[in-house]
Image: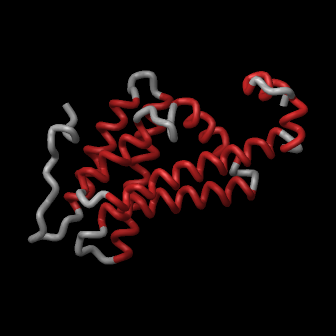
Amino acid sequence: MSQVSKEAEVFPSHLFYYFDSKEELLKAAFIDQSNSICEALSRIDHLSDVQDKIRFVGDLFFQTNSVVNQSSSGFLYEAIGMSVKDPDLAEEKYRLDCSIRSSLRQLFDNSELSESAKDENAEEAYVLLVGFKLSAFFDSLHDMNYGKKKFEKSLLRLINANTTPGLTKQSPNTALAVE
């Protein structure tokens, strides 16, 4: 806790007043970060265009902003790792996962797919998001811009592959096209 208080530029006694341990502090911070992400994701409801929704998700998770940035991403990975052994963190991680999947599912709501197919596509979209985010975070050959472009292009491909014949497929515009 002394290292945490030093980084936060507060006295250790202030941390111990609110938290019994570093683990309790981590749980509280993870819940706060999860809530911020879920709140930000709720803004996708106000977008009607699929490409705007794709861009919104890409910007939220791959561009530095007040909700997700390099530091918060590293923290989330640490907390997610701890959630394997901590039931409280595992429950919060599950809530966050469900919120992200639910937001991604909206990308398929205008399709004529069955409800279970929409859920499966949302799961695949989530895997794309996590995979490209982790690659951009840990792989020195790729940066967040690369991850964002690959995520958006792959997600657009997934949406188009699952568009029912007769419905208009989404065409990639220059903002979503990957060079």
Q: Is residue 93 left or right of residue 101?
A: right
- Residue placed furthest toward the bottom: 114
The figure's colour scheme reads secondary structure
Quadrant where the image shows the C terminus: top left
Would you identify the image quadrant in which residue 18 lies?
Answer: top right
- Residue placed furthest toward the left: 166
Quadrant where the image shows the N terminus: top right
Q: Is residue 114 left or right of residue 92?
A: left
Residue 121 position (above or below residue 132):
below
x 39%, y 26%: residue: 142
Q: Closest to the observer: 127 or 108? A: 108
Image coordinates for residue 157, horizontal then vertical, percent: 23, 52
Q: Is residue 168 left or right of residue 32?
A: left
Would you identify the image quadrant in which residue 16 lies?
Answer: top right
x 39%, y 66%: residue: 120
Image coordinates for residue 106, horizontal then vertical, percent: 35, 64
Image coordinates for residue 44, horizontal then vertical, percent: 37, 56
Residue 148 position (above or below residue 57):
above
Q: Closest to the observer: 159 or 19? A: 19
Image coordinates for residue 90, horizontal then vertical, percent: 68, 56
Residue 5 position (above or below residue 124):
above
Q: How many marks?
A: 0
x 27%, y 74%: residue: 113
